[in-house]
Image: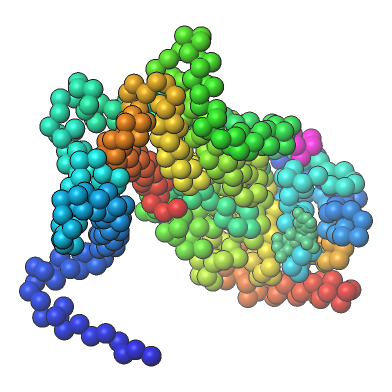
Amino acid sequence: MVASVEDVIQPHSLDPADVPHPLVAMENLALVFGTGEGAVTALTNVNLSIKRHDFVSLIGPSGCGKTTLLRVVADLVKPTSGTIMVDGGTPEQARLDRSYGYVFQAPALYPWRNVRRNVELPLEIMGLPKTERQERSTRALETVGLAGFEGKFPWQLSGGMQQRVSIARAMGFEPELLLMDEPFGALDEITRDNLNLHLHELWKRTQLTVIFVTHSIPEAVFLSTHIVVMSPRPGRIVDVIECDLPYDRKLDMRETPDYLRIAHKVRDGLRAGHSYE
Amino acid sequence: MSAPVYAPEAAVAPALSTRLARRLHRGRVLPIITVLAVLLAVWCAGTVYMNAPRSIEMLERQGPDWTFQQLLDATWSMDRPVVPTPVQVFTDIWQNTVEREISSRRSLIFHSWVTLSSTMLGFAMGTVLGIVIAVAMVYVRTLDRSLMPWVIASQTVPILAIAPMIVVVLGNIGLTGVVPKAIISSYLSFFPVAIGMVKGLRSPDPLQLDLLSTYSATRSQTFWKLRWPASMPFLFPSLKIGVALALVGAIVGELPTGAQAGLGARLLTGSYYGQMVQLWSALVMSAVLALLCVFAVTAAEKMVVAAHGGRR
Ligand SMILES: Nc1ncnc2c1ncn2[C@@H]1O[C@H](COP(=O)(O)OP(=O)(O)OP(=O)(O)O)[C@@H](O)[C@H]1O
Ligand SMILES: [Mg+2]
C-alpha cells in the first residue's frame, strides 16, 4: 500500500460551492418488499440529505435496511413511496451517467477473470483504451495492497483479498459518489486500519462523496462527517450524528475525548434503536 | 471385518516396475484395461454361445465324436458367423483401413470420413441453432414460455421416422449428399445445447448482474462480458452429448439414402447381406469415431477452462 492516493482518483474540477443542491436527497422514502401477509417493510419515513463531499456512514443492527437504502440510491431497487434525487436527477439518470461506484457486501468478482481483468471490467465497459485501463488498474491495486496479484484468479485469493479487489474495482472507476456496503467487514484489524486511512486520504484530497455501511463504531467515527443510526422493523433513521472531528484525521485520534464522545453518542443511539423493539 | 491388505511385493519391487505400477494406479489406465478385458471376455463367450448351434450341426455332419476344443475352434473361425470374434472384426478393420487404398469403396477410412464430415457439419449447425434458441429464450420473454414445449416435442418424435422424410423432401428439391444427413444430425444435437445454454446463460447470480447495471452496461455487454463466459461450464457437457448425437444422426441419415457411402451404409449392407463381420467393423469404427469426437470436445473444453482461470 504505497501508492499515493491522489493517483487513484483525480480531483474533480467541480467546486462544491458552485453546486447548492444536495448530492443525494430523500424525502419520506419507504420501501416494502412483497405484498399481503409476507410483506416486509424494509424502509419507512426516511429523510436524508447528503451534500457533496460528505462522508456519511450508515450504522445499525443486521436487517435494518442499510443495504436496501444503498440499493435505492443506486437504482437497483425502486422505492414504494417518497422521493429521491441523486445528483439533481433520478437515481436512474445517475446510474446511466455512471456517477457512482458500488462496493457490494460480497466481492461479486467474475471467476473467469483474473484480478487485473476484474478491476478493468468497468473500464472496459466505459470503453477506455487499453493503456489507460492498465494504468488505472495498477494504481487501484497498489492502493489496496494487491500489487503483484494481477494475474491471480479469484479462487486463489482469500475472502479479504477478494473484497479488496472489489474495492480496487470501484476505485479505478473514479466515481464522484462511492457507495460502500461493509467493504472492510471481512478484513483483519491492521489491514482495516490501513484501508480506513487510505479511504480517508482519498476522500480528503478529492471531491468524493461516500455513503458507507458499517457495523464498526470506531470505523464510522473515524471516517465520517455524519453518522446515520438506523433501527429495524420497520427500518428507519433514529438519529443523524454530526461528526465534527478535524478535517485532517490520524489513526491515533481514536483516543481523543472528542472522538470518544461521538462514539459514545453513536452507541447510545444504537441502544435506543434496539430497545425500541 | 477384513484385515487391511498388506502387499509386500509392491514394497520390494524394482524401481522401474514400481514407477510403472504407480502410474497405472494413479492414472485411469488400469480401470480401462480391466473393463476392456471383461468386455472382450464377454464378447468371446457370446461368440461361442451364438455360433454354437451351427458349428455343432457342421461337426455332427463330419462325425459324432467331436471335442469341446473342436467346437471352440469352429465357433471362432466361421466364414459367416452369427457373431464374429474380436480377432475377425479387428482383422477386417485392419484390412480395410491400413491395407486398403483410401479411394477404394471398401475402405473404412473413406466411409468414416463420409460419416464424419456430415457429423461435423450437422454438429456445427446444431450447436449454432441450440445457442440461438437459448439466447432467444433468455432474452425474449414471450419465447421463454412458448418455445420450450416445441423444443421438447421435437425430441419425442423418433428420428428413424423423420430421417427418411427429410432425405426424400430435400432430395426432391435437389439437395442430396452431405446436407440432408447434416440436417438430421443437427436436429438431434441442437437439443442438449439449447437446454444446457438456457441454464448456463441464466447462471450468473443477481449480484453479478447488479454490478453490470451499476456500470449501465448495454445488453450486448452484459451478454459478452457476463452471460456468455458464465455459460461455458454448461456448454461443454452439452456439446459432448451433442456431438455423440450428431454422429447417431449422421448414421441414421445414411440408412435411407440407398446406402451408398458412410458407416450407416456399411451397417445396412452388412445386415442386408448377412455380412456380420462387415457390420461389426462398421459398428466398432463408429464407436471409435464417437470417442474421437468427444475427445476433441474435451480438448477444447480444457483450453477454455485454462483460459478461464484453470478451475470451474
Ligand atoms: N429482495 C428482497 N426481498 C424481500 N425482502 C428483502 C429483500 N432484500 C432485503 N429484504 C428484507 O429487508 C430487510 C432489510 O434488509 P437489508 O439487506 O437492507 O439489511 P441490512 O441492514 O443490510 O442488514 P445486514 O447488516 O445484515 O447486511 C430485511 O428484513 C430483509 O429480510
Ligand atoms: Mg446489508
How is the rendered protein coloured? rainbow
Q: Is residue B161 on the magenta stretch?
A: no
> Range of the magenta residues?
A89-94
Q: Position of residue B213 (x, y in %)?
A: 66, 40
Q: Residue at x 17, y 47 (%)?
A: B77
| Whether residue A78 is situated above or below residue A211 in the rendered picture | above
Q: Position of residue B113 (x, y in %)?
A: 29, 27
Quadrant of the rendered structure where residue A56 is? bottom right
Q: Quadrant of the C terminus of chain A?
A: bottom right
Image region (quadrant) for ligand 1: bottom right
Nearest the viewer among A198 and A246 is: A198
Quadrant of the rendered structure where residue A232 is? bottom right
Quadrant of the rendered structure where residue B147 is? top right
Q: Quadrant of the N terminus of chain A?
A: bottom left
Q: Position of residue A46 (x, y in %)?
A: 87, 54
Q: Is residue B217 left or right of residue B23?
A: right
| Whether residue B242 is situated above or below residue A79 in the rendered picture | above
The kind of secondary structure the magenta stretch mainly shows is helix
Q: Position of residue A108 (x, y in %)?
A: 57, 52
Looking at the rendered structure, the number of numbered marks drawn on it comes to 0
Q: Is residue B156 left or right of residue A55?
A: left
Residue A186 in view of the camera: yes
Q: Residue at x 20, y 68 (%)?
A: B22
Q: Residue at x 43, y 43 (%)?
A: B240
Residue A127 in view of the camera: no
Nearest the viewer among A245 and B58 is: B58
Nearest the viewer among A120 and B17 is: B17
Q: Residue at x 63, y 31 (%)?
A: B136
